[in-house]
Amino acid sequence: MAGRTTFGPFTLDRARKQLTRDGQAVPISHRGYVVLEALLDADGAPVSKDALMARAWPDMMIEDGNLTVLVSTIRRQLGEDADAMIVTVPRVGYRLVAQADAAGRKEPAGPPLIAVLPFANHGSLAEDGYFADGVVDDIITALSRFKSFAVMSRGSTFALREKGADARTAAREFGIRYALEGSIRRMGDRLRVTAQLLEAASNTPLWADRYDGALADVFTFQDRITESVVGVIEPTIRRAEIERARRKPASNVDAYDLYLKALPMVYAPGPERHAEAVELLNRAAQLDPGFALPRVYAAMVYEARMSLRVPPLGNRDKEACLELARSALALGGTDPLVRALCAFLLFRVGNDASALEGLRAAVRDNPNNVLILTAAADGVGVHGCLEESIGYHERAYALSPGSNEAYWNLFGLGASHFTLGNYETAIEWCLKSLGTFNDLIYSYICLACSYAALDRIDEAHAMIRRVRELNPALTIKLIQDGVQDPFAVAVIPWLRKAGLPER
C-alpha cells in the first residue's frame, strides 16, 4: 500500500520506509517498521501475534516473547503517546487505535474498544486516590475477561490521566468507542463512588450509578463496586452496539455487524425471525471464518425452536445445531461465553453430560457475565440441579436487573421453584417476569401449572388461554415428544388439569 499514512503526530512514508514525527525522522528498526505498517493496515482492528510475527520474522520460528520485546521497543521509540496508541488486546495481539484523521476515517470494524478512565479523587486524603486507582484496576481486570469488546490496558488508561484526556478526546485520538469514568469522595467515615458509561465520541451517557459504603469495609465495598459496574457494562454495550449496527447502512457492514443485527432475532421469545437470524449469522461466518459467535448463535436458534415445539427450519435441525456448536467450540474455545453456550447446547441437544463441567468452568472464568450465568443456570437446571440453577439465576439478575434478558432469569427462578414444588414462590417470580416482558410463553405455562397445583383453576384456565394465543398448536403430545427436562416433565399433569389439549 503505497503513499503516506498519518496517525497522531506521526507519518509513515511507505515509499521511503521512513517514520517521522512532526516532520522529524524517528529512528526505528526494520522489524519495528513492518509491525507498525501491519497495525496501520488493519485500520484499527486487532492484529494477531502470529500475523505480526510472520511480518517481522518471515520464514522463522520464534517465541511470543520476541514480539513483546519488539512492541515495547517501538513504544519507547515513539515516545510518551505510544502506550495509549499501541494497545495490547488480551489473548489476541495488538491494535493501533490512534489516527489523526479520525473525522475522515471509516469506523474500525469488529468489536469496540472500551477505556476505563482513571477515577477522579475528590477526597482530601491521598489514600482515597489509591482506592480510586484500585477500583479502576479491578474493573479493567474483570472486563478483560469479556471477549465481546477490547479493553484498553492499565498502562494506556493511566497515561490518559497524565494528558488530562476526557472521553471525547480519548475517542478522537485513540479510537475508543465507550468510556467508563467516575469519581470518589470521602465524607467522614463514608465513601461515595460515582460511575457512568459514555458513548465516547458524543459523550452521551448510557448508564450511571452511585455507590455508598463504610470506609471500614473498604475492600468489600471495592469488590461490590467492581461487580456492579462490570455486571451492567456488557449488556449496556451490547444494546448500544446492536443499535449502532441497526443504523449502519446495509452496504457498509462486516461480520461483526451482521452478528449484531441477528442478536435481537435470536433472543426474541418468538420464532418469527429465526430464519432471517440464521441467514445473517451464516453470512457473518462466511465473511469471517474465524469468528465463533455467529456459529454459536445460529445453533442457539435451532435449540430454541426445539424447546418452543415449533416446526423445524429444515430436515436436520438437530444435527445442524450440534455441528455448529462443535465447530464454534473448536474456533473460540478460549472465550468463556463460547464455551458456556456450546456446553449448554451439547448437553441440552446432544445429551452430553460431560459438557456440564464446561458450564461451571465458564462461570469460574467469568463470574460477572450475565449470559454465561444464564446458560449455566439453564444447563444445570435441565440436569436437575435446581438449587444450583437458582443460585446462578439470582446472581445474573442481581448483576444486571435492567438487562434485556432479565425476564428469562426471572422465569428461570419461577420454573426452578415450581419444579421443587414451591408453587407460591414460582408464581411470584413468573409474575415479575411478565412485568418485564409480557409475551414469554414459558412464564404463562409455569403460572398455569402453579395455579392448577394450588387449585386456583380459573386463574389456570386464563393462563392456558394466553398460552394458546401465543402458540395455538401447542399440545400435551408436542411437549411429551420434544426435548425433555425436569420442568417439561413436571408441567405435564398440571397442564392437563389446567386444560391444555392432549393433541
Image (spheres, grey):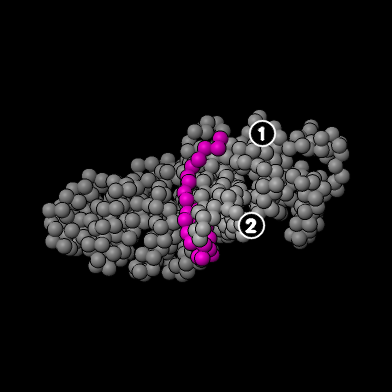
Left or right: 421 as drawn, with respect to 383: left
Q: Secondary structure at mark 1?
A: helix
The amino acid on which the numbered mark 2 sits, given as a three-letter code, is: Ala
Q: Which mark is residue 102?
A: 1
Q: CA distance from mark 1 to mark 2?
A: 37 Å
In this orientation, does residue 424 appear? yes
- Residue 224 part of the magenta-drawn span: yes
Of residues 169 and 387, the one drawn nearer to the viewer in this rendering: 169
**Dot in front, 1 or 2:** 2
Query: In the rendered image, which quarter contains the C terminus?
Result: bottom left
Query: In the rendered image, which quarter contains the N terminus?
Result: top right
Q: How many marks?
A: 2
Quickly name the residue at label 2: 126
Residue 80 is situated, as x and y percent measured from the top left of the image, at 77, 46
Of residues 166 and 42, the one drawn nearer to the viewer in this rendering: 166
Q: Secondary structure at mark 2?
A: helix
The amino acid on which the numbered mark 1 sits, given as a three-letter code, is: Ala
Name the residue located 84 percent from the left edge and 34 percent from the top edge.
23
Left or right: 226 as drawn, with respect to 42: left
Left or right: 352 as drawn, with respect to 502: right
Name of the residue lying farthest toward the front: 188
Quarter of image, res 139: bottom right
First in sequence: mark 1 vs mark 2: 1
Of residues 201 and 439, the one drawn nearer to the viewer in this rendering: 201
Of residues 52 and 235, the one drawn nearer to the viewer in this rendering: 235
Name the residue located 52 percent from the left edge and 45 percent from the top edge.
197
Q: Relative to 7, is 333 above or below?
A: below
Write the start and end of the magenta stretch as one range. Answer: 202-229
Name of the residue lying farthest toward the top: 104
Left or right: 222 as drawn, with respect to 96: left
Name the residue located 67 percent from the left edge and 39 percent from the top edge.
173
